[in-house]
Image (spheres, coloured by chain):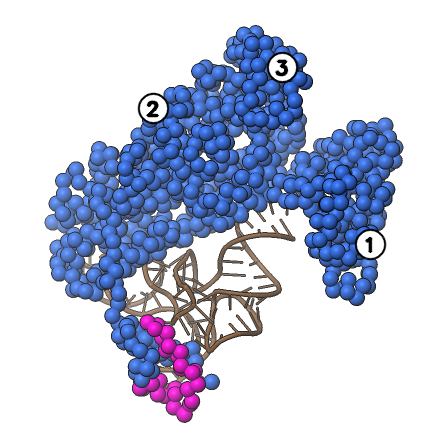
RNA sequence: GCCGCGGUGGCGGAAUGGUAUACGCGUUGGACUUAAAAUCCAAUGGAGUUUUUACUCCGUGUGGGUUCGAGUCCCACCCGCGGCACCA
């Protein structure tokens, strides 16, 4: 009696068998070739698993299953990125402890993931909010601190007034906090910063060594935003001060008709007494401070500014006296917070000059016009390269030459130098929140005094050497402790600094972390000098734990996160780098860059064996709701994977997610289309239940089978999962035809290539076909190789064209010569008709493809 | 504004410069059924010629170009998506 395909009856069963057989567990130091596959571990939100997760995880599950069958020692791990704001917000709302919420959410996620038959190695499950785990997150911070890469700054930061939290640039989208959509304002706060900018060049350069999607590389490069140019010093008339300006167009320096500084620029304070209109200037600065970053950038067209009356800068090239302005379109944190205004050759400067009546002086001419040497009044800025005019001794040079020459001149005369600027800023690493890793530092007044008394004796140069130690009064201070006087690291053996229990998770109104309210925890002893000290109450951002989690999976396999780090060097060496990392495009500028930075640092201090953590990076496209909008509770268009699994089975969901469209493109969910995949699996089930379909196979179907093996194998490697599935469907369509049979072994080959997409179904049929017992599995079999000889075809359909238009087709031998093809083609009735009375001017013959007669 | 990607049937999408629309969905017709669902079979880009067998023309965002031949290459433009955005 045949039974209908019922995924419910088979999926749970095989999941248990696989777990018992431990076929998904990786073996450290196995002699097999290693293959480390990684997906972005989920944040266990209350929303549960999203079909977007499924797309990413299934894709690498396909790879993982295929690699195991190809004989690799595969590591495909999973864990939880458990710290995060939504959990904390939910805790505030409900009064339930974030830890409990997280545990509950993890349980749901785990059940959902397991129901999909994903071949994760659950024995290495990790959780970033586990003290054993975040002990190491803290350790990495301490290493950065020790090496002078963590520092404190009182800086204007993006501040979300609703969440009462400082934000990284990366968390601000369109001037709004990405999580809660509240308009962000500027606020000065003491923050821990990480010097990611020290790695800017490496982060660009080492992209050469890795295999990332091209668009990911470009996006990272643009984000880092390196530009080469010249730094020029403009002396202030009758003053010891000078303004340093960065420009990529030093060739235009003879066209400078003003300098503009950012409102935060120190020159304003320094020259306060000399600025004749100081009140006006102060008012302008106050006003621009009140504007949010959003307003400042939104009102792009309306550039405002105020002159610093009585202040003049001297152009070092021609000694010209030029006015100085303050304007909030100049960014304080880039290029020294000052720009030279060249209205004739920069669009923004042109607008600014028009508005305030500054002189527009042409110093670069387009080549064509230079030759006719006609000067003309500029209607708009000419921003391209050209030939220099009105530029003293540099007139007549090309822009490119002039940049070289003028920079040389400046270097010689001490007025400037070659310089590189980055858009990338240092990473704000403090959060004023509860649900994160405590920053493992204390503040000690006594140590502060000791360090400050001593600091002046240390030569500048020594403060730049990473990992330096300084002995003062029998205490050793690390570079970080010298650079940040009073801040003392918690020793490694005292880690982790555990998150204490709190009653209220609400941030204080001042913006400080809720931890500040726990006096018992805050007040402590300095681990160095044993004087009273205060703990840092800021916690780390949610990216901290995800910076290194791919190493945590490896540590988990060795020992349960015990110190010291030397325990793990061997296992890092075996597994790293990650061979293939798949995740969302939205993490390209944040997580991907941050984790590369941290990994590079770990490489520099000798912890990890390679410069880059990820050898290959791909991205899946977003899955939109059925209505074409982003899936969201508020639109009511969320597809719940549980319901799909319940109704159609995990295999259908998996196959559909791979089939729905090109893997890296955004795609709209369609339940109707998904049913097509369900039908396909049903057809597979039915056909393999039919004993009459097993038998002597024809050459035709053998060829088709091996072509399918080839196509599926190749398409998987190219992440063209959609066409791989199409090929599987085509094969089944062919096999469904009357008189088509397969031998048992051939049927097995098909099941193997299907098994990576629909593991449960394939396993079930495979077992029935070969009468296997439960210690055997299709996944312990070898991935099929296609038969090269077999798929060499003997015949092909010759296309006959007249002037490039298809007029006839005929089957011929594969090795037919041009002459033979010509004869055959010419004698076809249809072709005769077209050729009669016409002269053949040319014949084009493409072997295995076509013949084309040209008559015109 | 800058950078990147894309525009193909009613829909999702296939196509190393060589048969455009594979595969799937939908639709229509048929088989099975008391009926429906499910399943199976067939047709399915548009317009036209023809009693039929058949045949012709037009078709990959728009306009040009290169080529025996262009969805694919080149130029210009339009539209959509993603990222960055006063970065000097």
Residue at 70% in and 49% down? A404
Cα–Cα span, label 3 and label 1: 55 Å
**Which stretch appears magenta?**
A825-854
The answer to whether the residue labelled 3 contacts the one labelled 1, judged by CB atoms less than 8 Å apart, is no
Colour brown maps to chain? B
Q: Quick one: label 2, few (<14), some, or many (20+) residues within 10 Å?
A: few
Give the farthest residue toward the bottom.
A837
Residue A559 circle label: 2
Secondary structure at badge 1 equals loop
Relative side of A301 to A545, left or right: right
Task: Please name which of the two marks, 2 or 1, marks the residue nearer to the observer.
Answer: 1
* Residue A783 location (% of width, % of height): 25, 49
What mark, if any, has residue A390 been given in the picture? 1
Asked whether the residues under the numbered discs 2 and 1 touch, taking CB atoms below 8 Å apart as contact, a structural biologist would say: no
Q: Earlier in the sequence, mark 3 or mark 2?
A: 3
Q: From where the camera sits, is residue A174 visible?
A: yes
- In the picture of the structure, the residue carrying the numbered disc 3 is A451
Please tell me which residue is depicted at 36% across the width and 48% down the height of the picture: A657
Disc 1 crowd rating (10 Å Cα; few below 14, some 14-19, many 20+) is some
Marked residue chain, label 1: A
Chain shown in blue: A
Of circles 3 and 2, which is in front? 3
Tag 3: Cα neighbours inside 10 Å, few (<14), some, or many (≥20)?
A: many
């Amino acid at each position: 009696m045949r039974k209908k395909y019922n995924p419910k009856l088979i999926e749970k069963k095989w999941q248990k068998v696989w777990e018992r057989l431990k076929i998904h567990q990786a073996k450290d130091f196995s002699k097999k070739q290693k293959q480390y596959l990684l997906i972005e571990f989920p944040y266990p939100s209350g929303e549960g698993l999203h079909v977007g997760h499924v797309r990413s995880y299934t894709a690498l599950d396909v790879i993982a299953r295929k690699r195991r069958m190809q004989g690799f020692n595969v590591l495909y791990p999973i864990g939880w990125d458990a710290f995060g704001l939504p959990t904390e917000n939910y805790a505030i709302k409900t009064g339930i402890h974030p830890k409990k919420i997280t545990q509950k959410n993890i349980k749901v996620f785990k059940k959902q993931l397991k129901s999909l038959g994903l071949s994760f190695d659950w024995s290495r499950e990790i959780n970033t909010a586990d003290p054993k785990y975040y002990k190491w997150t803290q350790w990495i911070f301490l290493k950065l601190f020790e090496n002078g890469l963590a520092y404190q700054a009182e800086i204007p930061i993006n501040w979300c007034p609703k969440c009462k939290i400082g934000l990284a640039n990366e968390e601000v989208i369109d001037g709004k906090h990405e999580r809660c959509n509240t308009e962000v304002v500027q606020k000065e706060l003491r923050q821990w910063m990480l010097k990611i900018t020290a790695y800017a060049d490496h982060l660009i350069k080492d992209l050469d060594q890795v295999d990332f999607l091209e668009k990911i590389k470009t996006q990272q490069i643009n984000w880092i935003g390196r530009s080469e140019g010249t730094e020029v010093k403009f002396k202030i008339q009758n003053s010891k001060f000078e303004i340093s300006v960065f420009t990529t167009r030093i060739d235009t320096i003879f066209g400078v008709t003003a300098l503009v500084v950012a409102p935060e620029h120190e020159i304003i304070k320094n020259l306060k007494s000399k600025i004749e209109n100081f009140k006006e200037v102060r008012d302008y600065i106050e006003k621009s401070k009140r504007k949010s970053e959003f307003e400042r950038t939104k009102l792009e067209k309306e550039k405002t500014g105020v002159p610093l009356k009585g202040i003049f800068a001297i152009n070092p090239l021609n000694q010209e006296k030029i006015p100085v302005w303050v304007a909030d379109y100049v960014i304080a944190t880039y290029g020294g917070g000052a720009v030279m205004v060249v209205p004739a050759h920069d669009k923004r400067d042109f607008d600014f000059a028009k508005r305030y009546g500054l002189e527009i002086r042409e110093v670069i001419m387009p080549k064509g016009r230079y030759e006719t040497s006609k000067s003309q009044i500029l209607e708009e800025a000419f921003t391209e390269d050209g030939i220099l005019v009105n530029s003293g001794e540099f007139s007549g040079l090309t822009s490119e030459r002039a940049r070289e020459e003028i920079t040389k001149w400046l270097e010689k005369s001490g007025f400037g130098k070659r310089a590189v600027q980055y858009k990338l800023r240092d990473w704000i690493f403090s959060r004023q929140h509860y649900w994160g890793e405590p920053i493992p530092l204390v503040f000690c007044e006594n140590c502060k005094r000791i360090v400050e008394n001593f600091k002046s004796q240390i030569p500048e140069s020594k403060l730049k050497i990473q990992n330096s130690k300084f002995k003062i009064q029998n205490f050793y201070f690390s570079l970080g402790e010298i650079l940040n006087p009073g801040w003392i690291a918690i020793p490694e053996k005292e880690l982790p600094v555990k998150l204490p229990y709190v009653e209220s998770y609400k941030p204080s109104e001042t913006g400080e972390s809720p931890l500040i309210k726990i006096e018992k925890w805050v007040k402590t002893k300095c681990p160095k000098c044993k004087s009273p000290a205060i703990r840092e109450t800021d916690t780390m951002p949610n990216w901290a734990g995800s910076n290194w989690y791919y190493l945590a999976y490896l540590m988990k396999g060795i020992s349960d996160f015990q110190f010291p780090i030397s325990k793990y060097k061997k296992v890092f060496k075996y597994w790293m780098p990650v061979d293939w990392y798949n995740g969302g495009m939205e993490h390209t500028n944040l997580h991907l860059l941050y984790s590369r930075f941290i990994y590079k640092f770990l490489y520099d201090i000798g912890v990890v064996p390679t410069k880059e953590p990820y050898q290959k990076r791909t991205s899946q496209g977003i899955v939109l709701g059925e209505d074409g909008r982003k899936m969201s509770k508020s639109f009511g268009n969320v597809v719940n994977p549980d319901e799909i699994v319940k109704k159609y089975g995990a295999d259908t969901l998996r196959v559909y997610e791979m089939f729905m469209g090109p893997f890296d493109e955004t795609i709209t969910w369609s339940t109707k289309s998904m049913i097509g995949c369900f039908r396909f699996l049903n057809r597979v089930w039915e056909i393999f239940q039919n004993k009459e379909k097993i038998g002597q196979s024809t050459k035709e179907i053998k060829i088709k089978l091996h072509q399918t093996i080839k196509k599926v194998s190749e398409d998987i490697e190219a992440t063209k999962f959609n066409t791989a599935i199409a090929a599987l469907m085509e094969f089944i369509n062919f096999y469904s035809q009357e008189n088509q049979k397969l031998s048992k072994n051939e049927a097995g080959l098909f099941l193997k290539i299907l098994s990576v997409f629909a593991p449960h179904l394939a396993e079930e049929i495979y077992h029935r076909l070969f009468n296997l017992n439960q210690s055997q599995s299709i996944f312990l079999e070898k991935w099929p190789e296609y038969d090269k000889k077999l798929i060499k075809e003997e015949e092909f359909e010759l296309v006959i064209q007249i002037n490039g238009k298809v007029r006839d087709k005929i089957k011929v031998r594969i090795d037919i010569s041009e002459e033979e093809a010509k004869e055959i083609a010419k004698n076809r009735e249809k072709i005769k008709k077209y050729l009669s009375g016409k002269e053949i001017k040319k014949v084009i013959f493409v072997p295995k493809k076509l013949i084309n007669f040209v008559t015109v």
